[in-house]
Image (cartoon, grey):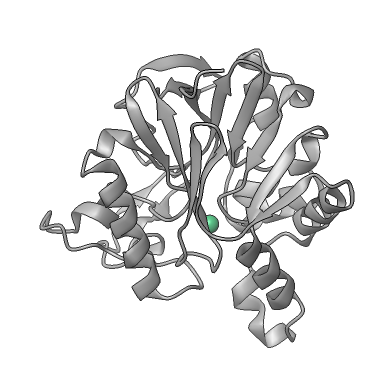
Amino acid sequence: MSSLWEVHVIEFARSKDQPLVDLVNGAPPSKVLDLPFGFVLARNGEKVVLVDTGFLNEGSGAEFSKKFGIPEWISPVRMLEEMGVTAEAVTDIIISHAHFDHMGSISAFPMARIYLQKKEWLSWNEAIALPPQYGFLTAIINPDDMRSAFDAAVEHRLVLIDGDRDNLIPGIHVRLGEGHTLGQQFVIIETARGRLVAAGDCIYSRLNLTGHRHDGVYAPLNNGIGSIWKQLETMDRINDEIAGDLSRLIMMHDNDRWSHLPLEKEVEGFRIVRAG
Ligand SMILES: [Zn+2]
C-alpha cells in the first residue's frame, strides 16, 4: 500500500435559509444560505476510510434533522454505493466530533474500526449526565449515536486517541483541534496533490481563516462549547498545515459546495467531488 490516498468529498444533506451568523461570528445577520453537509471518503488499496459519516434520517436521527432544519437529505450509505463502496467494505471511520450530523450513521458500518478522541468521548459522557439546565451543551448530541459508539466499544471497534497521532493509518494523521467541541480532531490526508486537511467543524467557512475584512484576523465560530481562544489556536494550526492554500482545506459544510474541486458525480442534486 502506498501512503497516497484517493479522496472524495460526498455531500448528503442541506439546510435551508440558515443565517451565516449562526456559524461565523460577526457575519451580517441578513446573509442566509442553504448549508451543505458532507463527509470524506479516502481509499487506498483494501483500505476504505471515512472522515465522519453523516446521519441517518430515521428514528432519533430524523428528529434531530427536523430540529435543526435540514430538509434535504440522501442516505450517506447510498452515496457510498454510488462510489462502488458497500457499508461492509468500510474499514475505518475517523470521527471529527460527536455531533449528530458527523457521527449519526456509525451504526450502518458494522465492520469499521471507529477512531474518536478520548477527550471527545469522555467529555460527552460527562456532559450528558449533567442536570437538564446544562442542555445547551448537548443540544447537538444524539444519545443514540453515543449508544452506537458504546456498542462499537463493546465489540472492541472503538479506538480512543489521546491527542495528535501521525500515521494513525499510513498517510493519515490526526490532530486535536479543540474549540467547537472539547475533543474535536482534524485529519490530514496525504494525496498525490499534497496534504489535505479535513477540518471537521474546526472551520465552517473560508471567512474563519481569511477574516471578514480579508485581513487574516481569524473569525471565531458562533456555534460551539469550547473556548474561542482554543478555536483560534486550532484555526492557526490548520492554516499552518495548509500553508494558506485554501484549496487543500476540506470543509464539511463548504457553502460553495466544493465548487473548486472537480465533480465526480451528482446524485439527485447531491455532489461528489474529487479532492485528491
Ligand atoms: Zn459540529
Q: Position of residue 222 (x, y in %)?
A: 39, 67
Query: Is residue 56 among the parts visible in the rendering?
Result: no
Say which residue appears at 42% left-offset and 76% top-offset. 227
Report the number of numbered marks.
0
Query: Is residue 174 among the parts visible in the rendering?
Result: yes
275 left or right of 165 in image: left
Nearer to the camera, 168 or 114: 168
Considering only vertical position in the picture, is 202 above or below 83?
below
Q: Position of residue 133 (x, y in %)?
A: 67, 87
Nearer to the camera, 120 or 55: 120
Nearer to the camera, 6 or 21: 6
Say which residue appears at 49% left-offset and 32% top-offset. 171
Q: Quadrant of the C terminus?
A: top left
Q: Quadrant of the N terminus?
A: top right
1 left or right of 129 in image: left
Q: Position of residue 258 (x, y in %)?
A: 37, 31
Say which residue appears at 35% left-offset and 56% top-offset. 20
Q: Position of residue 113 (x, y in %)?
A: 74, 39
Nearer to the camera, 221 or 2: 2
39 left or right of 63 in image: left
244 left or right of 108 in image: left
